[in-house]
């Protein structure tokens, strides 16, 4: 699985958009980009994933560059409850079979300020 | 619908002891993965169970072993505890994929905090 690079920490004002970057320059053609977050003292929570097209769900948007070497997770209107460690993970798509393991880095601590 | 549950919540052991942690997967899930998360680090994959067999394993010594029961619940056993085994142990469940799919989401439990003294 490709390695990812994320900033250690970021701040965001409440109500503003939070843009979390991730570099994955060694990503291969069949690898997906996944985002999870971990609120303090809880287990990680799935946010979104994508292959090459931009994706949006009720939680966030994922923007993947055309060369797929980097991506940005966007929380459109950050709230205090979005304060968490955000993990960007690259892994192959599980086309049948058991779940592939998730390889977590140290993530980005997003602090949403009131 | 209950999500992933883990027990106990907290545990304190001494070096050399053995510990068993338990996990019940989310309803409808049949695959269980275990992760270890040291303080300030991201979770590290230990192993994964499906159909009562270990399917994948991370870089952990044989002191770490597991089991999956017919009802899909799972146990993580750690023998000869070391101080470095102190961590949050996370269980994640998912559904075994059939056919093609971009992703089968893993749902994590709240974890068991193990302290080894």
Image (cartoon, grey):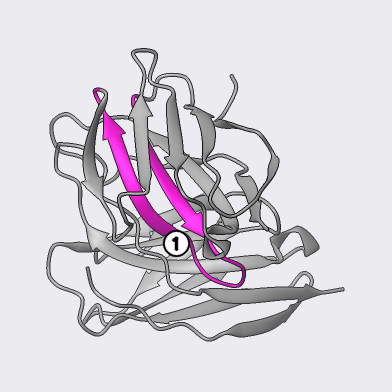
Question: Which chain letter goes with mark 1?
Answer: A
In which quadrant of the rendered view does residue B45 lie? bottom left
- Range covered by the magenta-colored residues: B30-51
Q: Quadrant of residue B76?
A: top left
Residue A12 in sight here: yes
Disc 1 element: strand
Q: Position of residue A70 (x, y in %)?
A: 33, 81
- Left or right: A16 with respect to B53? right
Assign the magenta stretch its main secondary structure.
strand
Towards the viewer: B80 or A40: B80
Can residue A58 be spotted in the picture?
no
Q: Against B57, is B84 above or below?
A: below
Residue indicated by mark 1: A35
Residue sticking out furthest to the front: B16
Task: Indicate yes or no whether the magenta region holds residue A27.
Answer: no
Residue at 71%, 66% (x, y): give it: A83
**Eyeballing the image, is B70 above or below B52?**
above
Closer to us: B106 or A50: B106
């Amino acid at each position: 699985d490709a390695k990812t690079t994320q900033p250690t920490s970021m701040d965001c004002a409440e109500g503003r958009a939070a843009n979390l970057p991730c570099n994955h320059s060694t990503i291969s053609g069949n690898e997906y980009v996944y985002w999870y977050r971990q609120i303090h003292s809880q287990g990680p929570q799935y946010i979104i994933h994508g292959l090459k097209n931009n994706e949006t769900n009720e939680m966030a948007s994922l923007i993947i560059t055309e060369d797929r070497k980097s991506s940005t997770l966007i929380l459109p209107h950050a709230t205090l409850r979005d304060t968490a460690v955000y993990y960007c993970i690259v892994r192959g798509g599980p086309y049948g079979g058991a779940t592939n393991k998730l390889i977590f880095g140290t993530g980005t601590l997003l602090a949403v300020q009131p | 619908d209950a999500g992933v549950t883990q027990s106990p919540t907290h545990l304190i052991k001494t070096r050399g002891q053995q510990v068993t942690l338990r996990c019940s997967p989310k309803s409808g899930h049949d695959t269980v993965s275990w992760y270890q998360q040291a303080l300030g680090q991201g979770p590290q994959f230990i192993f994964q169970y499906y159909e009562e067999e270990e399917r994948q394993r991370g870089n952990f010594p044989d002191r770490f072993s597991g089991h999956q029961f017919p009802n899909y619940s799972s146990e993580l056993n750690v023998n000869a505890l070391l101080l470095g085994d102190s961590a949050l142990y996370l269980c994640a469940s998912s559904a075994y994929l059939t056919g093609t799919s971009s992703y089968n989401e893993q749902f994590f439990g709240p974890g068991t905090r193990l302290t080894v003294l």
